[in-house]
Amino acid sequence: MTAAEAAQAFHHAVTAYVAASTGADATADLSFTTGVARVELSTGMQTARYFDVHVPATALTLGDPVFYLPEAAGYPQWFVANVGITYNIPALPANGGQWVGAPGGIQWENVDGHSVFLFTKASATAPWQLASISKLAPGVSVPALAVDGDGHVPNVSGSDTALLAQPDVTGPLQASVADEGPASPASKLVASGPLTTGIYDNERAHLLGLTAPRGDVLQWELEGSNYRQFAFRTADGGALVFYAMYLNTSVQTPASLNLSRPLNPGPAISVSQLLAPLLGRGHPTPRVKLEGQQLLSFAAVDPPANGGKVEVIAIGGDWSYASAS
């Protein structure tokens, strides 16, 4: 993996991303993306068409990327680019000016700052694909990495036991705090912040924009995905871990939750403007259940043993699915 190869893959993907994100072409080829990035771009295009909003080519201004290249370790190959982004995205009047689906309810998604772009290549003959774009929390930087003499960074195994937590349980630990809040036993290992206890607070207070009639049941769950996890070695012996998870949010009647029969409908459930594009026009007003799912990407710092707590530092993604009944 060379910096020149990374730069070529990055610039190809960014050019294609900007062209597709205008939403003008409903059949745009998204093969340069995979995973979270494909979902995010596809949903953004659907939203643009649904609200008849034109996204200008100048919506994103990107700075010069800084590439982090892992040591060779077979396929899939991968690398990360750290990029400063300035936003000029038009507001959507129908949803209070928030353009994207506010992943995890985080409202600084379109605030100028840095994002980490994850790229993967499945095989020797496969193309490089953009897998995710995760926005760093305001004021947070990528930690110093353990760069070798050739400018590459060692990979970290998901089962590495020299860290505070094995990297492959970083996501589940975060999910426990996002689902249960500060009372979760995992909070002993996971730091509070906008992407842990903050998701819990957002769901509990606002349910990511879903509203429930009196008597209906509100539920959310951050859960694992089958997308591959990657990790760099940090300079202090810890790991910078990249992974993806699903955030499921639902409103439903008690009868629906309990699988009662007959399944009598309840009061009308209001459909969030963020879910409307995924449901499409003409869908019936839900009176039994409304659910949405976000596919989210994260970056987290997993410290060495006795080195503090896991800190989740970046998030990306969008709504990936919605259903109403």
Image (tube, grey):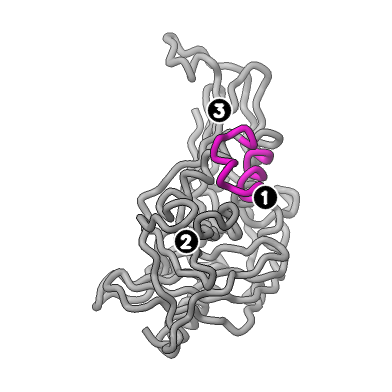
Label annotation for residue 194: 1
The three-letter code of the residue at mark 3 reads Pro
| Left or right: 232 in relation to 282 | left
Secondary structure found at label 2? strand
Q: Residue at x 68, y 39 (%)?
A: 201
In this view of the protein, which residue sits in the foreground, 171 or 244?
Answer: 171
Secondary structure found at label 3? loop
| Left or right: 96 in relation to 144 | right
- Circle 3 crowding by C-alpha within 10 Å: few under 14, some 14–19, many from 20: many
Residue 3 figure quarter: bottom left
Label annotation for residue 242: 2
* Spot occupied by residue 300 in the image (x, y as percentages of width and height): 54, 58
Range of the magenta residues? 181-203
**Magenta span includes 189:** yes
Q: Which residue is mark 3?
A: 286
Secondary structure found at label 1? loop
* Spot occupied by residue 321 in the image (x, y as percentages of width and height): 47, 44
Q: Choose the circle earlier in sequence order: 2 or 1.
A: 1
The three-letter code of the residue at mark 2 reads Phe
